[in-house]
Image: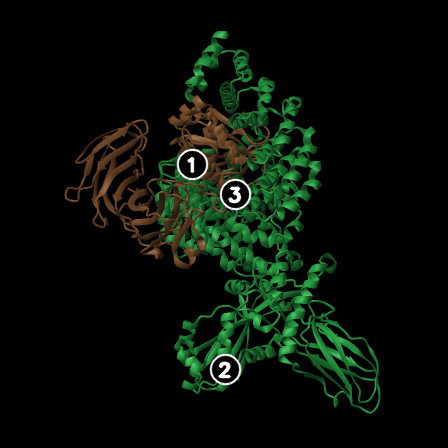
Chain colours: A brown, B green
Amino acid sequence: MIHSLFLINHLGDIFLEKHWKSVISRSVCDYFFEAREKAVDPENVPPVLQTPHHYLISIYRGKLFFLSVIQTEVPPLFVIEFLHRVADTFQDYFGECSESVISDNLVIVYELLEEMLDNGFPLATESNVLKEMIRPPNILRSVVNTLTGGSNVGETLPQGQLSNIPWRRAGVKYANNEAYFDVTEEIDAIVDKSGTTVSAEIQGVIEACVKLSGMPDLTMSFMNPRLLDDVSFHPCVRFRRWESERVLSFIPPDGNFTLMTYHISSQNLVAIPVYVKQSINFFEAGSCGRLDITIGPKQTMGKTVEDLKVTIHMPKAVLNANLTATQGNYTYDCTTKMLVWDIGKLNPQKLPNLRGSLSMQTGVPNPEENPSLNIDLKIQQLAISGLKVSRLDMYGEKYKPFKGVKYVTKAGKFQVRT
Amino acid sequence: MSYTSMSYASNLKTYNPKCQDVPPLAQMPSVLRNEDLKEMLESSKESLKLEAMKRIVGLIAKGKSASELFPAVVKNVASKNIELKKLVYVYLVRYAEEQQDLALLSISTFQRALKDPNQFIRASALRVLSSIRVPIIVPIMMLAIKEAAADLSPYVRKTSAHAIQKLYSLDPDQKEQLIEVIEKLLKDKSTLVAGSVVMAFEEVCPDRIDLIHKNYRKLCNLLVDVEEWGQVVIISMLTRYARTQFTSPWMEGAEFDENKAFYDSDSEEKKDQTEAKPYVMDPDHRLLLRNTKPLLQSRNTAVVMAVAQLYWHLAPKHEVSIVTKSLVRLLRSHREVQYIVLQNIATMSIQRKGMFEPFIKSFYVRSTDATHIKTLKLEILTNLANEANISTILREFQTYVKSQDKAFAAATIQAIGRCATNISEVTDTCLNGLVLLLSNRDEAVVAESIVVIKKLLQTQPTQHGDIIKHMAKLFDNVTVPMARASILWLMGEYCEKVPKIAPDVLRKMAKTFTAEEDIVKLQTVNLAAKLYLTNSKQTKLLTQYILNLGKYDQNYDIRDRTRFIRQLIVPNEKSGALSKYARRILLAPKPAPVLESAFKDRDRYQLGTLSHSLNLKATGYQELPDWPAVAPDQSVRNVEILREWAPIVGKTKQPKSDDKFYSDDEDEKEEEGSDSSGSGSEDSSSSSSSEGLFLSVRFTVSGAFSFHEAKLMLLVISITNISMTAGFGSFLPKLEFITIMISFFYDFFFFCQHCLFPQNDSKNPTFRTSGISLFHMSFQVTTSSFGPLKTYELLHHMTGKGLSAKYHFPRQPCLYQPSMVAVQVILTNSSDHALEEIHIGDQSPASLNIHCFNTIERLEPGASVTVSMGIDFSDSTQAANFQLCTKEDQFSVSIQPAVGELLMPSTMTEQDFCKEQGKLQGMNETSATITMATANASRQAINKQVLSVANVGEVPSSQNNFSSLEARWATETEATICIGSPKLDRRLKNIA
């Protein structure tokens, strides 16, 4: 399976290597660097590469490449999924997944990698299990450890590894028992020039933060479970009960986890919260262009649209932008050619507008395609699909937990073509 | 030096992880630095050692050498500090290969740790021991693996499964021994072990399919609970397994093989006629499909993909589409996941458009997608294009063509070309659109358009003139060689349609010939030759000029071509017969190129594999075998597990007497009921307690009956909730009859697995006896309580020339073979002379398995003799035909069994029964109706009636549901007694 792992930063330096079988020289990465060179953008590097003796499967996350070396046939998704799981674990342990953080915690990273794979086959990937074996760093513990000579490595096999519920640690105790669920929906949409929706779908996720003592058995039911026809669950969810009763029944992991994700496909009707009126023109003559964008609310279900932001990736020929915004600020980065207009709250009475001229490089033919607009937004207290949690019950424990559900709608890959 | 080491030591107290890469450290010569670490390792302070190890691990992580510290590090292998120990392990695994001799020093520590009471320590010792790749310790590793494979802790067993692979890669000669361990571990019931051992199996002996047989059902059933990574491995192994063991569920010539159906639909029809026998899916095949389906909801994308490929390769065609939605969902995942999933969808969408067509909008390209994602989406959109959606797709393509990503724009043009050839309705529209693109500013776009137009024109050889003219005009501006070559080829091919322009183009080319790319030169020579043939007046000189240029070209291909063309077209005395055919050779109508998907041939690889992703065979790729024409023996998957059976036998054997089959509570009720029904009036005793009006008898009959091929299937029949009321007997006198409906549900999925008697008796002598005693008991029930059984006529004495034969089913286990049904035949001689040599002759069907009675030498007049025989009805009610022969005559007779006679009683507790009943699915049902008077509805009476229909046994029952029965009673005039549905799950199999 996975033979070796190299972590490579955006400059192309290998700053960590780990081998689960015999050592493979890091020169194998040269093939990757070649592909990286060719791809121009790091996103464009093909995830699966072939070299004379090895296969390279890589992911790009947080400006880092996780490059794994494979020697024999293996499902590529297996490796990709695992690499992402490694990155998630780092994120979970250190709060972020970046070169500096990994270099700072090299020993813990190494111990983690050691536990996560044995001979290239995943051994323990559950965050709850790992945390029992290798405790995440915190200042207090490192001070105590230095003084007492204690370690942050567990001495016994975590209970979870052996039980039927490997995701939950045993003996959890909290003074305040609470369970929070965040229902977050992201709208992926393509809107064309004329304002008609080309495609729109909703990607929903229920993130949970459960801090409950003992072994609680939770049941979550929905007002309108029929909305959810395409779902994926955390392994803790009992699939059969979902099939028969459309309720989520589960013994939760301790701490933060993704309970479920769902997908409401483009076949359904999806409400689009804002409309965009835009005109971007490039004139052949004066080597300049005009830009005029107005945003207004469309289907917001009576809620306020917040954190509204428009990002435009301008063609290379655009040198500068001289614009005025009626609301919010705009910035134009000449090197990346990114025009960002940060609007903030959308006021339906006074629609935000951005207009002005773009100065173009002379002598270069005008771009034939207008850049598309990427919209970011946030609507609090609303799940745009209409999903609602009706109740959450707890069995198995005596105490009364504090429960909370929060809804947020965001724009995912929301694109307006011009 | 002493200064530096001091400073480090003092740093330690306030150790800050950021110091790991302190600049002075890096600047120091490595020897010095490592000296310093060595000192720390040799100090007596644990914290110093730990610190040193942390820094060493830091070095390893950065890929810097720390091998010279080996002796100092290895000393700490037995440290008490677990973190230090772990870091030493990390070091050992990394460097042991380089320093084999020194590594041996650590072995004894691991051997000791392998015996540690803490499973975690045992496991990690085995992990490290097997990870240090030192060939000399192979025997020690082997021993350790064998011991660990029998460890009580599943975690240690899991580790041993991993160690198998490591040892195998270290020393492949150990294969045979390792396979033994794998075989043993495959039997493990722990979900923790399952994934790892299958992984070891895949690595060490993927061809030993025979090891899987007995574990197949277990693996299928465990699958949902196995950890996600194991699931992926098991699913892909089971996909291969299923391909070798089951027959194809794909109907011949069904919609799947579209190509095939296109070409030889006639022969397909013929085939259909010849192979008309209906396909029946192996229950094990169905089991696999059923148990993997919930995993489509997994959060792990690799699992979802694994299930998707399993369905693609194994499921009947109409079931494959259930994976669509899940695959589309994965498209929202990380970019790399998208890439792989899109690749697989691309392959799938070629064969099955319908699967993804409803989701077409999910494949629309966004400007923020990575290039490889865009191209894959484009590929899929093109595959999905059909008459109905082509206009929407083309509108999308129009947007894409304008993309700033020129590579993507070029790919879109190719896609348009493919749509145009595939869907004839839009060819013209596409062509016009592409011609418009010729005036695009971007060269790549223009070049691509020309190439695609060239291909399209070939497929549409009617209306070229204008387009070719247009292209000729563009010719001067086009610089991409491929595009120029394409234009030249078009000129030559259709030179007769543009007689004025073509020579002019050739003239221009003659000027620039030397500066052109090779491919353009070749096409120029081509054009010249064609023009020479069609229009030699105008172009003779030009052609000769070009041929001369070509003759001295630097490229030998061009020189070759020039020489060849000259000989072919210019007539001279040496030119052979070929020049006569020059015109036919050069201007032959050429078949249009087929614009195909790049994923056309990817389906030769199993979906979801690395090979599929790379489109080449990766090392270690296991071919997915083709379906076998005839399924191999299904019985190999049967499992006989006896341990769990024995105690149940013991338990159920105790209630010998009928009364004890019932709980006390029920006994009372029952007596009450029989009293009142016996008197037929409302008794004071029952009326006094109004609730006591209702009598409920609930009893359960269980039986086992023999099924396919020497297998006994356990069939359980329960009579639940036979409920009567004494009171109603008088209130509603009309309620006279209780209809007893007996339904035998048997689950065909499982019948093969239940072997009441193991075929190999010698292996399980104890089991056999317990089985017999069980039967003995059930038999007692049947015969003692319900008297003689029905006798059927086999041969009438009139037709039998004096010999008459009658038979009945004694309901005893057949002595000859467990799968046989015992039949007793009474032969009577009613003639006036003795009959000799009575025996059984020909049997039909030929496959019929009959154990014949010994030939009866002589039967005196008036005498009768009872013989017993065994017939294997193969669990069907098909009649067994055979001939009854005497010395002189032969009589054809047949025995047709009732379903009830095929059964065998079996004993189980009520809980077991209910459990099995609850799980029943995929049922077959047989029912018989028994009518009897209410007055007679005592337990015995019902029992008797039931038993007259089927050979079953009772299951003790303890509970009744009065209230629900009350309701039922009140609304119905007839009582339906439902007789339960036995479903057999694994546990039951074991019981059986």
In the picture of the structure, the residue carrying the numbered disc 2 is: B675
Q: Position of residue B668 (x, y in %)?
A: 50, 74
The residues bearing labels 2 and 1 have C-alpha atoms spaced at a distance of: 73 Å
Tell me the SS state at disc 3: helix
Instruction: Identify which amino acid the numbered label 3 is placed on.
Output: Leu
Instruction: Identify which amino acid the numbered label 1 is placed on.
Output: Asp
Q: Which mark is residue A162?
A: 3
User: Could you tell me which chain the residue with mark 3 belongs to?
Assistant: A
Instruction: Have a look at marks 2 and 3 and say if they share a chain.
Output: no
In the picture of the structure, the residue carrying the numbered disc 1 is: A88
B841 to A35, vertically: above or below: below
Q: Which mark is residue B426?
A: none
Q: Which of the 4 quarters of the picture holds residue B366?
A: top left
Camera sees residue A239: yes
Q: Quadrant of the C terminus of chain B?
A: bottom right
Camera sees residue B448: no
Q: Position of residue B528 (x, y in %)?
A: 52, 38
Tell me the SS state at disc 2: helix
